[in-house]
Amino acid sequence: MMNKKLDMWKILPFPLIVIVLAIAPYFLSVYYLSLLRTVILWVTLSVSWHLFSGLTKYVALGSAAFFGLGLYFTAKVLNYWPVLPFPVVVLLAGLLNFAAALLIGLISLRLRGIYFAIVTFGISEIIRVVFQWWEIRITGTRGTYIPIFFSHQETYYSILITSLAILLLVTFLRKSKFGLALRMIGECEEAAAHAGVNTSIFKTIGFAVSAMCIGLMGASFTTRFTYLDTSIAFDSLYSFLPAVMTLLGGAGTPYGPVLGAVAMSLISEYLSVTYADIFLIILGVVLVAIILFMPNGIMGVVEKLRRAELSGKG
Amino acid sequence: MLDILIGGAISGAIFALISVGLNLQYGVTRILNIAHGDFLMLGAYVTFFFFSSYGVNPLLTLIISGPIVFFLGILIQVTVFRRLVYLSKSAEELEFRSLLACFGLSFIIQNVVRLIFGITPIGSPYLNEAVNIFGETFQLNMIVAAVISIAISVAMYFLLCSTRAGLVMRAAVEEPTGAQIVGINILKVHAVSFGLGAFLSAIAGSMWSMIYSDITPYKGPIFTFIALAIIVLGGMGSFVGSLVGGFLLGYIYYITYKWEPLLYMAVVYIFLLIMLIVRPKGLFGK
């Protein structure tokens, strides 16, 4: 009985948050709506990144490739094949990313640690450079226009719906045997293999699902742009920030990536408005300070306080 | 053909110098300094500052830019990485955290330089008259830079192999605990090696800016990845590997740059990937 009550209290906030987010456009100004949209984007990217890299501790730094592929694919389909309904295009972009990540995972997941990070970053850069070369040398045009105009509300809802779907999927996967297998790989890969987990299959599929989520987010984010080029779509910030945000929040905990992404995107927004010229310098200082003084992130600090309180009472 | 043979060797000599610094830092401190290219960019800007404001001979600025960035490197090692080593419980954790810390440092360095100098590409052109070698023409500064790079690399080799300081460094790499037992101050060794890596990088940057006027605050990462490709090719921690890898990549770079300048970075990355997948230890790795 007691347990059930507790569970209710644990679950109750989520529908409330969803309802508030769903009606947000009716009471928020355009500025705050776009801020909220940015926060949702980064939360989803961090959570998607964390599903694979946080659980398995294979630090991937190539999210920009999948985000950019999602954006570019969607923009191109909207241009050349406008009959397809938008949600179908987004789903196709997700599938494309899943396939691309399977391929990249097969190549790169044989490596560990810093080598894996370098390879994933390298692959995302190769994709960016080759796209750029293709545009300049073969098609002779830079970038692509997005032919459909999306209102602020349409942009917001397309991102919100995609994000909720991804968060549900990730939560479900994390609690399933699949998530358990990924976590085991993160704790000790050899032990996981001995316990009968086919580590290469789980790693590759985990990487692909995480990439698919990032690509889906990229695809739905196309609605925000009227023009795209390779330096916008494949910006290496999309590779680094999800990792940084997860670290800020606390890797390995379910709410770490969410907290980190909310905090980081609000800090960045505040700094970029108030101190526009030195914003990036401060961001760098904040990043180094987090690593030096909050090595386990916000969740680490929360945990420490909670323990201090418990031991104080005991 | 001769053009490729000599041009590739010139690029190779400079690349080798860039990678020797990164390799030294990684070999001794086990920290992969992703901000390495930013130290190079910093060196180029120091040269540019003294050249454009006071008219100092760019070649002479090597003795200014090197020490400035050397002390900056030591400062960063002592304030940031020493604490990271202390905080991290495992080698993996240290790798991940230092990667992100380097990313933050690189952000800071790039944007401080941008704030001071703006984003227009800079250079300190010097000795750019043509020289004729066996019928092919090259710029004099390229040859001077290549000769200086080779001289410094050879000097580094002797420093590591036949001086007491080098012996201490090698001891700190091979047997960190044992080195401490026999009285080597390993913290000092780490700081100096990190500074030395930054020093080599800055000198390469100063020379680069004499040849090419294409340095911007955001140019650093390209050099980082070139250096990374070289040390992966040659073997992490292997000095000779760095030299051989530098020349190999110099040729690859020179040939692809002649063929299609837009794709040279893609080729460098592809090479890095193939090497990591086929032989992650590198050509000279143990």
Image (cartoon, rainbow, N blue to C red):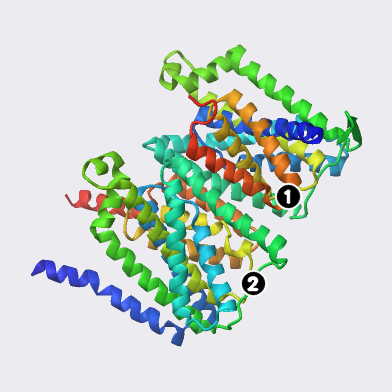
Q: Amino acid at mark 1?
A: Pro
Residue A5, which numbered label?
Answer: none
Question: Mark 1–mark 2 contact, CB under 8 Å?
Answer: no
Q: Chain of mark 2?
A: A
State the image coordinates of residue B170 (x, y, percent, origin top left): 52, 19
Q: Is residue A267 above or below residue B191?
A: below
Is residue A105 visible in the rendered image? The answer is yes
Which residue position holds label 2?
Answer: A144
On the same chain: label 1 and label 2?
no
| Horizontal side of residue B110 vs A26, given as left or right | right
The span from disc 1 to disc 2 (Cα, nearest Å) is 23 Å
Dot 2: element: strand
Residue displayed at 58% across by 64% down:
A233
Residue displayed at 58% across by 59% down:
A235
State the image coordinates of residue A69 (x, y, percent, origin top left): 53, 64
| Horizontal side of residue A96 vs B131, given as left or right | left
Nearest to the observer: residue B78 or residue B10:
B10
Is residue A259 visible in the rendered image? The answer is no
Q: Amino acid at mark 2?
A: Thr
| Horizontal side of residue B209 vs A52, given as left or right | right
Q: Dot 1, how many residues are within 10 Å of its Cα: few (below 14), some (14-19), or many (20+)?
A: few
State the image coordinates of residue B180 (x, y, percent, origin top left): 44, 18
Q: Chain of mark 1?
A: B
Which residue position holds label 1?
Answer: B261
Answer with the quarter of the image where residue A110 lies.
top left
State the image coordinates of residue B23 (x, y, percent, origin top left): 57, 31
| Horizontal side of residue A314 vs A89, given as left or right | left
Residue displayed at 40% across by 71% down:
A163
Quadrant where the N terminus of chain B is found in the figure: top right
